[in-house]
Image: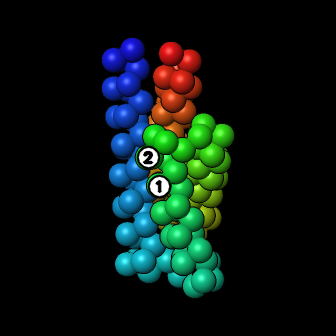
Amino acid sequence: MKRNRIIYWTSTGTVAFGMLFSIYKIFSLDYDHLGFPPYFRIELGILKVLGLIVFLVPQFPIRVKEWAYAGFAIVFISASVANFNSGDSSIKAIEPWFFLILLALSNIYLHKLQKV
């Protein structure tokens, strides 16, 4: 039980930190080379913040959390595709997959903790 909780919060915290950093990057760095319109930054940033709140607050129902997990998975896959297609380095295109794996691990252990 304690092991499951440690794995869950470690993976969840790492994904949350990655999301916080990506929110910072959206508003501070130049994303024009990815080809997204300017309003997309604001929309994506707001949705990431809302997703993080649902993701981190334990009182939200599991069904609502599943939507946050799905949204983050779409964000990570889309980030990888966007970086790959814009000519960024391979490292930059592979990096989101690391967070996607941690997101899946967090989801698995969320369900394990819910069963107990």
Of 92 and 56, nearer the camera is 56
Number of marks: 2
User: Would residue 37 be visible to someone looking at this image?
Assistant: yes
What is the three-letter code of the residue carrying label 1? Ile
Q: Is residue 71 above or below residue 43?
A: above
Mark 1 residue crowding within 10 angstroms, few (<14) / some (14–19) / many (20+): some
User: Would residue 69 be visible to someone looking at this image?
Assistant: no
As drawn, the residue found furthest toward the bottom would be 38
User: Residue 58, percent across and down?
Assistant: 46, 40
The numbered dot on residue 45 is none
Q: Is residue 53 above or below residue 58?
A: below
Of 56 and 48, nearer the camera is 56
Q: Which residue is mark 1?
A: 53
Q: Residue at x 44, y 46 (%)?
A: 57
Q: Residue at x 49, y 22 (%)?
A: 113
Please state if 19 lies on the left or on the right of 87 as rendered: left
The N terminus appears in which quarter of the rendering? Answer: top left
As drawn, the residue found furthest toward the front would be 59
User: Residue 84, percent across and down?
Assistant: 57, 60
Q: How is the image coloured?
A: rainbow
Of 64 and 32, nearer the camera is 64
Q: Secondary structure at mark 1?
A: helix
User: Residue 4, percent across and down?
Assistant: 40, 20
Tell me, yes or no, whether the two marked residues, 1 and 2, touch with CB atoms within 8 Å.
yes
User: Residue 22, percent across and down?
Assistant: 42, 63
What is the three-letter code of the residue carrying label 2? Leu
Mark 2 residue crowding within 10 angstroms, few (<14) / some (14–19) / many (20+): some
How many angstroms separate mark 1 from mark 2 (CA)?
5 Å
Q: Secondary structure at mark 2?
A: helix
The numbered dot on residue 56 is 2
Q: Residue at x 42, y 40 (%)?
A: 12
